[in-house]
Amino acid sequence: MQLRDLVDTVTGDEPPMARTVDDIVALGRRAERRRRAGFASAGAAGLVAVAVAGVLVLPTVGGEQNGTPAPAGATMSKPDRAAWSDAAPFTFTFTGYDAGTLHVQDPIVASTAYQIASVYSDGHDSNDRPVTEEEATAPDPGLSIEQQKRQAAAGGKPNLWAYLTVYRPGAFDPTGIRGGTNVTVAGRKAVRATLPVGLDPRNELDTRNKLFAWEYADNAWAAVTSISTDAATPTFEDLGGLVEGLKPSTPKPALVPFTVGYVPAGYAPLQIGTHAMPGLSGIAAARAGDYGGATYTRPAAPTSGLTAPYDSAEDGIADGFHIFVTPNTSSNQSPEPGATRCHKASDESGRNAGGFCNIWGADGAFVLQVSSAGLGGRLSQVELERVARGITVADVRNESTWTPAARALRP
């Protein structure tokens, strides 16, 4: 699915959803209109959320690559090949760290092939949480007077959406980065590339969009994707500063606040979000206060040859469904304790785009959603509702009651 196709509409008379795909791409709009990444809705019921399939399209066709010297300031010492455990999928194996002005957070998304963590910058706003207008426009005291004046005139700091994807051994293919340039940073093989406008490979390159990937262990790669409104920052050198700080930690199973009781034949778990929606939607709304989620796909997705997270591949996910457990504040509807509501979805041409079912918690504090909207729409509403009714939600406020994803996602 391409960016131009990601304008789905849900039938019904309810008010529109609060987060749109345009907000994710533009990155400068307030989080109040970004309650759900990747789903532009008119007349939407409940909290429809679709992964950002097709929004972040990274090229998968190999391009000519040229060896170049390491960037200025790069350390050429022998790399410290720290011992990374052979942990199972849906396991977190690193924690957040700082690298100059960049700050990698703890990972909150895990899949069969990688983990993803948000990356923040001292000099940018990251609109993955509700922010006040005062926060958005406050001058940065670290800037010069002239820079502060220019920043104030522009309405605040530049915006940045950046994330670090740490791939399992053999999952990432650096030769698949179109237009990639080979470099060496801190003694490690690396590739850097400028990405196109809208991250659509048919468009011209946009110097504000950058990808920097490096081999952190034998045949294992990590990649940082940076989408900024400022072409000058962060630089490739800034992104390369993340290399030496990535270290293994004690493996920690990714937890989800639910267990499934029924999964349609042929569907396999693909990715999860812990305290977040699954996939890049979870990263786009990392600080929105969501509880957790999962994505299933049919057939099982490949675990090698990747150049980007699954839901940003050029063709998206052809057949699948999401599970979301979120606070009632993530919906623009009044809580309906214990109620179940199912709806159909259609794209802008009126064609079937799947559907979704919402089940409100008995106390109305959370809402469980199972959705195939934007993921091929091949599951019937009967099947969606059967999946939803088979899910047992834990105490969303008490992580000690949550279940490791590897166990929770299989009936």
Image: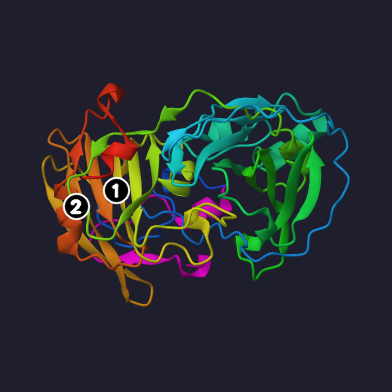
Is residue 91 toward the left or the right of residue 365 in the image? right
Q: Secondary structure at mark 2?
A: helix
22 drawn magenta: yes
Which residues, given as a range, are shown in magenta? 1-27
Q: Please, is residue 255 above or below residue 170 in the view?
A: above
In this view of the protein, which residue sits in the foreground, 162 or 183? 183
Q: Residue under circle 2?
A: 387
Instruction: State which quadrant residue 20 falls in.
Output: bottom left
Residue 217 in sight here? yes
Q: Is residue 188 highlighted in magenta?
A: no
Q: Amino acid at mark 2?
A: Val
Residue 113 image point, x, y percent? 49, 47
Q: Residues within 10 Å of mark 2 (few under 14, many from 20)?
A: many
Q: Residue at x 67, y 69 (%)?
A: 203
Taking 208 as reference, is 382 left or right?
Answer: left
Q: Residue at x 64, y 71 (%)?
A: 202
Q: Position of residue 271 (x, y in %)?
A: 40, 47
Image quarter where the C terminus lies is top left
Q: Amino acid at mark 1?
A: Ile
- Pointer 1 residue: 323
In this picture, is 70 found above or below 75? below
Instruction: Kindly identify the residue that appears in the image at 16 percent across and 55 percent down.
Output: 385
